[in-house]
Image (cartoon, grey):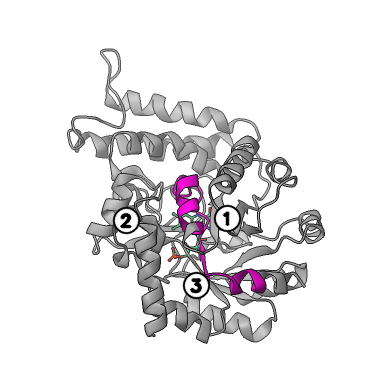
């Protein structure tokens, strides 16, 4: 039933595109509003957002634009405070970045990641910096409460809800069904798609290996094997053979012709993240946009060094230096690196920012959302 509702939303779109939810900055109200203006589904990545922000951003976008809005959340898995030894190891691995950075000290207009004072040298400054971040990990909560986040939106719900990293609890599915809001869930394998099919959700987002951002595995044991996964269109085809629910293709779709091909392979829509990241309206950092459009040979890597879970992003000094280094589980590592990522953005240094991007990023252009969608439309109709 809710699968039909989802299909009816897609039928009214200008093109069968969901702008991917992207937590952590890109999905500003202005950005989502400009996607809605072009007749697509606009998504907010609310994974880390406070209830009041969720309420505020949904009402702001509604006040400027009509159109289907998707609110996306993570399914965080419960975890305990890290053991003291594990925390110390993870902090030490980050502190060692100080040596690396000291050699590149004057790169960003003389601004460094860790600030020396008369009393502290560079390494001590780095130690103090990460020890401060580590304090947040001594006791829960380690992630936001999904119940509190969703409470913020039931009175004026979005048109769609979507979830990453697992199935939403059954009370969420029941509530969404009562208010006729389709629920979309990410699958990175056929097994996960079957579980989504059984759960009563409305549609499956088939996330292929090319996708930017976090891989949506349910099962954290499989996180050690990020390359265990099918390319997007193969995954779509495999899932569509086994389930009746609508399938959405996510990963590496950058051009109109690829949208057409995804539909041919069994998808009813596509979810595109990277293609929108470099748009003028996106809230991605200036440096992130610059590298997406100007460094086609930099390449992408899977790393869990930023958050504790594998995600695909542009390679940088951080992803290289942190290869095989100890990290805390998700999202504790994310909290531990938060101040570093923030500082790196503040001083305009892309080397310590999480620059999530899919393998298709060399197709990114610095353009408006309107120009991107016009280009996708032309390619879609020509294919
Ligand atoms: C910067 C960025 C942030 C992302 N954040 C989220 C998120 O918060 N929630 C989610 O479900 N997916 C997230 N994703 C994954 C997308 O939903 C989608 O799977 C991916 O963008 C598709 O691949 P593409 O980037 O090649 O288009 C993110 C992707 C990117 C690039």
Residue 26 drawn in magenta: yes
Figure quadrant of residue 246: bottom right
Q: CA distance from mark 2 to mark 1?
A: 38 Å
Coordinates of residue 222 in the picture (x, y in percent): 57, 64
Q: Quadrant of the N terminus?
A: bottom right
In the displayed structure, 21 sits above or below 151; it is below
Using the rendered view, name the quadrant where residue 221 is placed: bottom right
Q: Which residue is mark 2?
A: 315
Callout 1: CB less than 8 Å from ligand 1: no
Tag of residue 66: 1
Q: CA distance from mark 1 to mark 3?
A: 16 Å
Badge 1 vs badge 3, beta-carbon distance below 8 Å: no
Which one is earlier in the sequence, the residue at label 1 or at label 3?
3
**To which residue does mark 3 refer?**
15
Q: Is residue 203 visible?
A: yes
- Give the mark nearest the N terminus, 2 or 1: 1
Residue range of the region highlighted in magenta in the rendering: 7-36
Residue 340, position in %: x, y?
A: 39, 36
């Amino acid at each position: 039933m809710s699968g039909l509702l989802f299909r009816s939303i897609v039928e009214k779109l200008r093109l069968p595109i969901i702008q991917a939810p992207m937590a952590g900055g890109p999905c500003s109200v202005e950005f989502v509003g400009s996607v809605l203006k072009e007749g697509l589904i606009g998504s907010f990545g609310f994974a880390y957002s406070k209830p009041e922000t969720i309420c505020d951003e949904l009402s702001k976008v509604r006040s400027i634009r009509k159109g289907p809005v998707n609110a996306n959340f993570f399914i965080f898995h419960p975890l305990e405070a890290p053991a003291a030894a594990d925390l110390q190891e993870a902090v030490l691995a980050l502190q060692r970045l100080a040596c690396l950075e000291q050699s590149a000290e004057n790169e960003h207009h003389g601004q460094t990641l860790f600030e020396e004072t008369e009393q502290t040298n560079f390494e001590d400054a780095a130690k103090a910096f990460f020890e401060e971040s580590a304090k947040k990990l001594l006791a829960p909560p380690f992630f936001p409460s999904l119940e509190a986040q969703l409470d913020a939106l039931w009175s004026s719900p979005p048109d769609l809800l979507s979830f990453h990293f697992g199935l939403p609890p059954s009370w969420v599915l029941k509530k969404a069904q009562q208010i006729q809001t389709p629920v979309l869930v990410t699958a990175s394998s056929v097994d996960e798609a079957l579980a989504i099919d059984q759960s009563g959700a409305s549609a499956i987002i088939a996330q292929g290996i090319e996708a930017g951002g976090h891989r949506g595995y349910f099962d954290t044991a499989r996180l050690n094997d990020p390359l265990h996964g099918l390319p997007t269109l193969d995954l779509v085809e495999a899932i569509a053979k086994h389930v009746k629910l609508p399938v959405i293709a996510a990963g590496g779709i950058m051009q109109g012709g690829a949208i057409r091909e995804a539909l041919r392979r069994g998808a009813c829509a596509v979810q595109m993240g990277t293609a929108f990241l470099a748009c003028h309206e996106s809230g991605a950092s200036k440096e992130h946009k610059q590298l997406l459009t100007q460094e086609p040979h930099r390449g992408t890597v899977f790393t869990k060094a930023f958050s504790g879970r594998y995600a695909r992003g542009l390679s940088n000094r951080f992803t290289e230096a942190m290869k095989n280094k100890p990290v805390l589980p998700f999202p504790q590592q994310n909290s531990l690196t938060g101040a570093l990522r923030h500082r790196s953005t503040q001083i305009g240094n892309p080397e310590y920012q999480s620059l999530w991007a899919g393998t298709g990023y060399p197709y990114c252009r610095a353009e408006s959302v309107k120009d991107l969608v016009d280009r996708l439309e032309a390619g879609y109709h020509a294919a």
